[in-house]
Image (tube, rainbow, N blue to C red):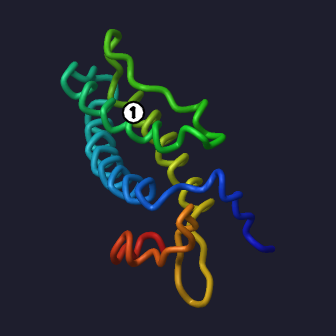
Amino acid sequence: MAKKIKTADCQPSKADVMKFIMMYDFLESAYVEMKDFSKKSPDTTLNARKVKSLNRILNDIKNILVNEPTFSYLDLLDEEMLPSNSDVVLMMSQYRSAMENYRKNYRTYQNYSYYWNTTEGDIKAIELEGNRPQWK
């Protein structure tokens, strides 16, 4: 079955894709750290500084995903009622899933190469993201 490609008015720009790649890396790094914290002490509450830092990442991701169906499921961390490590891992998992859907919607495989489908046309993935074997 052929992959459904969104219409041009919904496609990201090259700048959107570059921001997506950067934020994907930030999210993955933070997720790995939070997952480790959660394994050691799942019910420990995060401090306000960590929540603020994570929310900066999550907010930028939300801005990238604003036109996606997953957007309505993405919440920021509560800065007043500080979340536990396990709560943060759960929320970050939702962001990871939303980002994977975005990648699958706009990154396609054709003619033996991966391409990002952007408003500027199809751009070879390697030009934007370098060598990312985890995305093959």
Q: Nearer the viewer, residue 25 or 110?
A: 110
Outermost top residue: 80
- At horizontal 45% and vertical 74% (from top left) the residue drawn is 125
- Residue 42: % across, % down: 33, 30
When asked about the image quadrant of residue 128, the answer is: bottom left
Outermost bottom residue: 112
When asked about the image quadrant of residue 127, the answer is: bottom left
- Residue 87 vertical position relative to residue 110 in the rendered view, above or below: above
- Residue 131: % across, % down: 34, 77
- At horizontal 35% and vertical 47% (from top left) the residue drawn is 27
Quarter holding the N terminus? bottom right
Q: Nearer the viewer, residue 28 or 55?
A: 55
- Residue 123 vertical position relative to residue 19 in the rendered view, above or below: below
- Residue 13 vertical position relative to residue 34 in the rendered view, above or below: below
Secondary element at image label 1:
helix
When asked about the image quadrant of residue 103, the answer is: bottom right
- At horizontal 30% and vertical 33% (from top left) the residue drawn is 56
- Residue 17: % across, % down: 44, 58
- The residue indicated by pointer 1 is 59
Left or right: residue 50 versus residue 129 is: left
- Residue 33: % across, % down: 26, 44
- At horizontal 52% and vertical 43% (from top left) the residue drawn is 65
How many numbered marks, from 0 up?
Answer: 1
Mark 1 surroundings within 10 Å by alpha-carbon count, few (fewer than 14), some (14 through 19), many (20 or more): some
Outermost front residue: 120
The amino acid beneath tag 1 is Asn
Q: Nearer the viewer, residue 100 or 60?
A: 60
